[in-house]
Amino acid sequence: MADLKALSDEMAKLKRQLETVLYISGYRENSDLSGLSDYRQIKSADDWQKVEEYEGILYKLDEMQSHMDYHEKPIKEVSRLHMNASGRYETDGGHYYTSGSSIEFLKVEEVYNSDTGQYEDTPIWTASRVEHDGTDYYIVTYGNVELSGLKVRVRG
């Protein structure tokens, strides 16, 4: 079985392959396969099925590559959130969050430590997005996380 470094190396190779497939398909420019040189000559139901299937797959591959790209962006700031005068949560460096904003925050989760045979509180950087429920902002899938004082990092 591979270790994390070997897996990371394979993920880097996969990322390059995704870039190639997305480029040659023209998917990024068109959000479909209409850029293929023979697109207007496609006539058969089987080929149209293939086009539809490929478009669905390419949509997911594009999403995967975006996630991979995110982790290559440099970290610009690590800070704690506070509410600003506009009622938005903001970092010390002035980066603020509103509905739809991506957020990377430090959560603590119990993780099993095989060396000790115990579950331990482990800090984990986690990416999600911020939304507003009509009363306050919250992190999608982590509605119980308190934003005020939350440790975040900003990439860019």
Image (tube, rainbow, N blue to C red):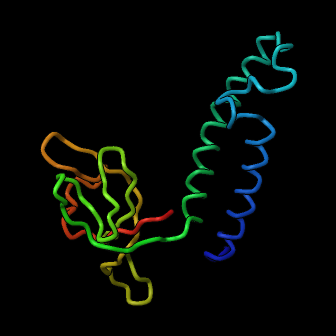
Which residue is rendered at x = 24% and y = 58% of the image? 89
Which residue is rendered at x = 32% and y = 64% of the image? 94
| 138 over 125 or under it: above or below | above
Relative image position of residue 144 (x, y in whole percent): 19, 57
Of 143 and 117, the residue lying toward us: 143
| 145 over 44 or under it: above or below | below
| Residue 48 image-quadrant placement | top right
Relative image position of residue 109 (x, y in whole percent): 32, 71
Relative image position of residue 140 (x, y in whole percent): 31, 49
Position of residue 105 in the picture relative to residue 137 (left or right): right
Q: How many marks?
A: 0
Q: Residue furthest left?
A: 135
| 142 over 57 or under it: above or below | below
Which residue is rendered at x = 36% and y = 51% of the image? 129
| 52 over 154 or under it: above or below | above
Relative image position of residue 39 (x, y in whole percent): 81, 19
Of 88 and 146, the residue lying toward us: 88
Which residue is rendered at x = 78% and y = 16% of the image? 46
Of 137 and 111, the residue lying toward us: 137
| Residue 23 image-quadrant placement | top right
Image quarter of the N terminus? bottom right
| Residue 5 image-quadrant placement | bottom right
